[in-house]
Image (tube, rainbow, N blue to C red):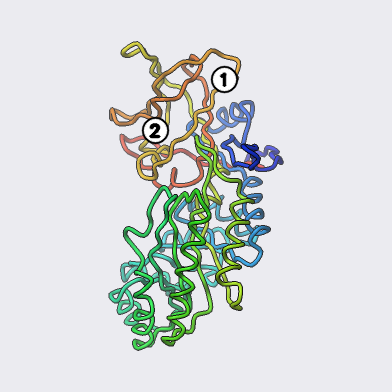
Amino acid sequence: MTSFSNSTALPVRIVNGSAVRTSHPVLSFDQARALSREFGTPTLVVSRSTLARTYHTMKSELQNVEMFYAAKANSDVSILRTLYLEGSSVDVCSYRELQSALLAGFKPEQMIHTHPCKTVQNLMDCYNEGVRWFTVDCSGEIAKVARYTPDVNVILRLAAASTSSLINLSAKFGCDPVDAPALAAEAGRKGLSVRCLSFHVGSQCLNPEDFRTMLTKARKAWDLCVAAGAPLEVLDIGGGFPAPYRTDVMSLSDFCRHLAAALDATFGDLPIRIIAEPGRGMCAEAVTLITRVVGKSVRGGLPWYFIDEGVYGSFSGKLFDYSDFELVAEAADIRPRSACIVAGPTCDSHDVVSIDQELPELEVGELLLVPTMGAYTSASASGFNGLDIARIVEID
């Protein structure tokens, strides 16, 4: 394994007196050339130090919140192992994610299972490995869990509205908070123990005030569920922590401080465990893609550059996650730049990576770096057209 040093702090800049989080590669072009000679391209480079710094920033600003990294964002063992060694727990949604977590060192007692609608096989496989916290959001799932795994601890998920989140994760899952007491009582009648309320404000939440709004609703639901007999002891505030792409976001420290204040205002009087499930906000910045220009042409008066990674691979986040990734060319600030199209390597005309970024004139063989490639990239990549999924390499 190649080792490089990368000890700088998470990149931020000041805008109108406020710190914002910026997108930045985790390695230099010299390092990228060395890695590409050794491993080829495309290659996803995981910076363990960047990942560790992100984890400890969250922990330092949210000292009373336990972190359960959402493995669905990126279940690569290099990501999971780093977080395990730093002290994180893990959120899994499937048996395969559980297996990756076990391989990284996590024990079943460090896991929660947050898929609200599980196959029986998924439920039983994870239960048989020792997981004992499972999520429900409706009567059907309560009946399923009561039939097959009645001795588990139940997490009841609430639907959450957000005005700033890029992806609504309550369009498919989560009960209306007003229905939570009745569902908690139903679970109790079936012999289940509802010990946790959870919600997720949505992925890439840009305004932490959305958490405060949902926490206020969750507190009302909490009090009513307790009155209905639920032995609640844990609040799960989900994920939603944003990452910088082509658009800057609030600094992680400021975002967490806003969230900590909202937690104190809504649940500060209760002696309970509070957990979070950061995925994108934890791992996205820790990974940079190295990709290579493999062809070029001029079409309609515009230069077209073809690279060896596209939307069926690590750029899958453009399709499934509404992410827009910055393409970084070497010495771009001192080379003339112009409008261009950057396309991926498959035969599909839909495989276009960028249509509105200005880049220097690129040569075949030239490397590009693409930061913030850690979340919902390799996790949703495919081998379409018979092309290999990008390899993953750890540094520092």
Quadrant that contains the N terminus: top right
- Residue 56: x, y in percent? 66, 55
**Residue 394 drawn at (x, y percent):** 59, 43
Dot placed on the residue nearer the N-terminal end, 2 or 1: 2
> For the view shown, which residue lies furthest in the front direction?
16
Kindly identify the amino acid type of the residue bearing the numbered disc 2: Gly
Q: Quadrant of residue 36?
A: top right
The residue to which callout 1 is attached is 332
The residue mark sitting in front, 2 or 1, is: 1
Q: Where is residue 243 shown, x and y percent of the image?
A: 53, 45
Residue at 38%, 76% (x, y): give it. Answer: 180
**Numbered disc 2: secondary structure:** loop
* Above or below, 230 relative to 311: below
Residue 299 appears left or right of 281: left
Q: Position of residue 290 (x, y in %)?
A: 52, 31
Position of the C terminus, as image quadrant, is top right
Q: Is residue 312 left or right of residue 152?
A: left
Amino acid at dot 1: Ala
| Front-most of residues 274 and 67 | 274
| In front of the other: 75 or 23 | 23
Q: Where 138 sits versus 308, above or below?
A: below
The Cα–Cα distance between marks 2 and 1, rounded to whole angstroms, is: 21 Å
- Residue in view at x 52 percent, y 24 percent: 367
Residue for badge 2: 310
The residue nearer to you, when weighing 391 against 204, is 204
